[in-house]
Amino acid sequence: MIVESAVIKFAGDSGDGMQLVGTLFTENVALMGNAIATFPDFPSEIRAPQGTVAGVSGFQIHFGSSGVHSPGDAPDVLVAMNPAALKANIHNLKANCMILVDSDSFGKRDIDKAGFESNPLEDDSLSGYKVVAAPITSLTKAAVSELGLDNKSADRCKNMFTLGMVLWLFNEPIEYTIQYFDQKFKKKPLIGEANKKALNAGYNYALTTEIIKSAYQVLPAKNTPGTYRNMTGNQSAAWGFMAAAEKAAKPLFLGSYPITPATDIMQELAKHKWSGARVFQAEDEIAGICSAIGAAFAGNIAVTTTSGPGMALKTEAIGLAIMTELPIVIVDVQRGGPSTGLPTKTEQSDLMQAVWGRNGESPIVVLSASRPSDCFDWAYEAVRIAVEHMTPVILLTESYLGNGAEPWKIKRLAEMPAITPRTLNQADSLWKPYSRDLDKLARSWVVPGTAGMQHRIGGLEKDECTGCVSHNPLNHEKMVHIRKEKIQRIANYIPLQKYKGKDANDLLVVCWGGQFGIVLGAVMELQEENKNIAFTNFNYINPLPKNTEEIFAKFKRIIVFELNTGQFANYLRAVLPQFKYKQYNKIQGLPFTVKELKTKFNQILSES
């Protein structure tokens, strides 16, 4: 049976390898040309009690030939490796969806630990679903028995047996996964062979038994020609920084301290030393950003990465970068807070911290990415703005974007906009460290050691021209206004804001960042029903695009959707107070769903 798209969720105990299964299935369908959106969802504890709901790890993938804007509201197929995985997801299942379970894991102790009062496979509570119960654990052990593995190693292969069944269910080839094992386990051929045997056994089990009635097929998406690569948001951000450094003809430096969910950017860059990228794992967040500031002073494309608690620790150093007017990029992959909060769950929790969270009058550029693949573009844009306007830039992404994946069409450097650093390499008798471009108000970038252009920088207030320390009251007031005006003038060098729904004038739906795909999907479905609704998503947060006021003025009502208590709505109230803003917020560590958004949109549209 051919279907336009499908949503699968792999769920199991944290040690069941669900993230690996989800990733391998994603790689497989990506190679087949499907559009993809993924949502890894796992606990933050190193090891929650085995078999409990708290220890369930999940990986949801939405893939198809069209209409894939998000990882999907609810799965068409749930793979539940134990009762806890079923318990954690049963509240969010479509009627008649398929539930594939490992019947070997439904013993009384497992059922009790999950919190079921009786065996859900026997008490008729799953009668509204298509339940496929297979003895996955015992079949896996039988499949690998001839290899002589110990019981624990054999048991670990059950995730590959499951993957084999799902590949058959969606008529996907298994050759690509076999190739992965050959490459991954070159030095451990026995483990590679065990995984291949389990994968083949699962595929053949589904093929030769009648436990699954029929297979489905999802056709490839109609992508523009080119070479594609499946990328997470953190990977594509790292690639965006490498491309920007190459385009700017500057060395790339990243100084960071590991923190979930941002660490993958550092790890990805560390794989690409061939590009000249230098990665410094600092002893703490403060050292991370200060090393980046030093690298920027020395003429590098300087980046530091972090998440909410790390942003708090970097605050003072961000102020130093603002005062010294050095170009660095601070990436904040947001997660639930405050404090260590929800390290593995998504939230748009740091916008206020990014825009205003510093001492003194300290304006800064704030950007946000929208999709895993466009983290590349926004990392690139962050560097462009930083080095052309001599300012630190904060790039906000989210756990939802950083860990999520989708196909990305590899770009050529020639396709990308130019990046022109304000570097001054030759001595100029008229140059002063804080003399400025009259249009951008940006100072020039002079690398220490440049003959005849020795200078000092630091955190104390600067004379408006010479850059020497100045406590002159009038100079300080003037410098505060210059720093503010410099950021505002960047609006002259960014694109105008776009919106979807030119014929609408009733309801404008506003969001920012990573909820773009989900909100867009909900709005598009209502537009197809001829509802009077339009949509705009902001990536330039500070400054806002110049036509923002013009767009807002066209609509009777404006509603702002975001995963916090209303940070962007409050920001808009501060900078564009002439409009009234409704807001809809969610603070559950989970993204919106298309269903809940459509319900809210329809409610507002029905109000007079």
Image: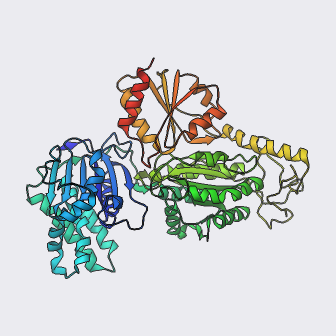
Q: Using the rendered view, name the quadrant where residue 597 is placed.
A: top left
Farthest-out residue, top: 608
Farthest-out residue, front: 117
Whole-percent x and y of residue 350? 57, 49
For image coordinates 60% across by 70% down, the residue present is: 280
Count the marks: 0
For image coordinates 86% across by 47% down, the residue present is: 476
In the displayed structure, would residue 603 be above or below residue 495? Answer: above
Farthest-out residue, bottom: 148
Viewer-nearest residue: 104 or 528:
104
Quadrant of the image containing the N terminus? top left
In the displayed structure, would residue 17 be above or below residue 531? Answer: below
For image coordinates 12% across by 58% down, the residue present is: 207
Q: How is the image coloured?
A: rainbow
Q: Using the rendered view, name the quadrant where residue 22 is placed.
A: bottom left
In the image, is 348 to the left or to the right of 296? left
Q: Is residue 456 visible?
A: yes
Q: Is residue 174 visible?
A: no
For image coordinates 42% across by 67% down, the residue present is: 46
Whole-percent x and y of residue 415? 53, 48
Viewer-nearest residue: 503 or 244:
503
In the displayed structure, would residue 172 be above or below residue 596? Answer: below
Quadrant of the image containing the C terminus? top left
In the image, is 487 to the left or to the right of 457? left
Whole-percent x and y of residue 313? 64, 60
Whole-percent x and y of residue 520? 43, 36
